[in-house]
């Protein structure tokens, strides 16, 4: 019997982990995950967007508009930052990070400072914003590569049914 040929690529696998992590986010409007991977294709850390530890998901706001202190923006930690902070002592120099959305400028600073060398993403829907323009400028100057995920997969289904295992 020959091996399967319909398995997913490393890039698809790691982006799948990032997308699965996003399902943990309590944010009602934006769910983002991140997966940091070593040069040897080992998962180093995972994160998703959410409130900092000790800040209740039920007590802090999730609104997108209104008085700034009554919106989520000053409080939520982005997935990329959480993945970097969730890392337990591994040197991130040379690592890759997989994220569904192109990183904002604040996350890009953390990515650059941590030594991550490549960003793989699915969507650049905020490309016209100053935040993403700043991200790309910083990454270009710092030598951090970025690329869109190359895949033919539109959807990947997970099953918890015993007959599928």
Image: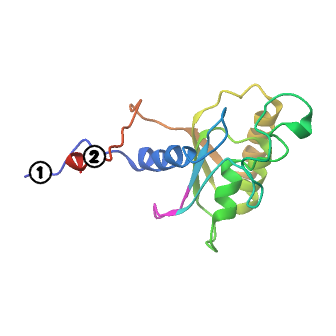
Res 38 seen here: no
**Residue 85 occupies quadrant:** bottom right
Q: For the residue carrying disc 1, how many other residues have a C-alpha within 10 Å: few (<14), some (14-19), or many (20+)?
A: few
Residue 31's place in the image compared with 94, above or below, is above
Asked if residue 75 lies left or right of residue 147, the reply is right
What secondary structure characterizes most of the magenta part? loop
Residue carrying label 2 = 161
Residue carrying label 1 = 2
Q: Nearer the viewer, residue 58 or 38?
A: 58
**Residue 100 occupies quadrant:** top right
Q: Percent from the top left, x then y, of residue 149? A: 50, 38
Q: Nearer the viewer, residue 22 or 66?
A: 66
Q: For the residue carrying disc 2, how many other residues have a C-alpha within 10 Å: few (<14), some (14-19), or many (20+)?
A: few
Q: Which residue shows up at 60% across the image and 62% down it? A: 94
Asked if residue 10 lies left or right of residue 119, the reply is left
Asked if residue 161 lies in the magenta stretch, the reply is: no
Q: Which residue shows up at 37% across the image and 46% down it? A: 9
Magenta segment: 36-43
Q: Which residue shows up at 78% across the image and 52% down it? A: 109
Q: Percent from the top left, x then y, of residue 115? A: 69, 61
């Amino acid at each position: 019997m020959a091996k399967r040929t319909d398995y997913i690529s490393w890039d698809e696998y790691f982006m799948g982990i990032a997308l699965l992590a996003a399902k943990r986010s309590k944010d009602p409007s934006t769910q983002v995950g991140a997966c940091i991977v070593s040069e040897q294709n080992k998962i180093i850390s995972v994160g998703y967007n959410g409130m900092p530890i000790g800040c209740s998901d039920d007590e802090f706001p999730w609104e997108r508009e209104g008085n700034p202190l009554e919106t989520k923006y000053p409080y939520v930690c982005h997935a990329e930052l959480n993945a970097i902070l969730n890392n337990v002592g591994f040197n991130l120099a040379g690592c890759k990070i997989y994220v569904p959305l192109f990183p904002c400028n604040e996350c890009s600073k953390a990515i650059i400072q941590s030594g991550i060398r490549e960003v793989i993403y699915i969507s650049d829907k905020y490309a016209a914003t100053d935040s993403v323009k700043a991200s790309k400028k910083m990454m270009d100057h710092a030598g951090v590569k970025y690329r869109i995920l190359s895949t033919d997969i539109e959807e990947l289904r997970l099953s918890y049914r015993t007959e599928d295992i």
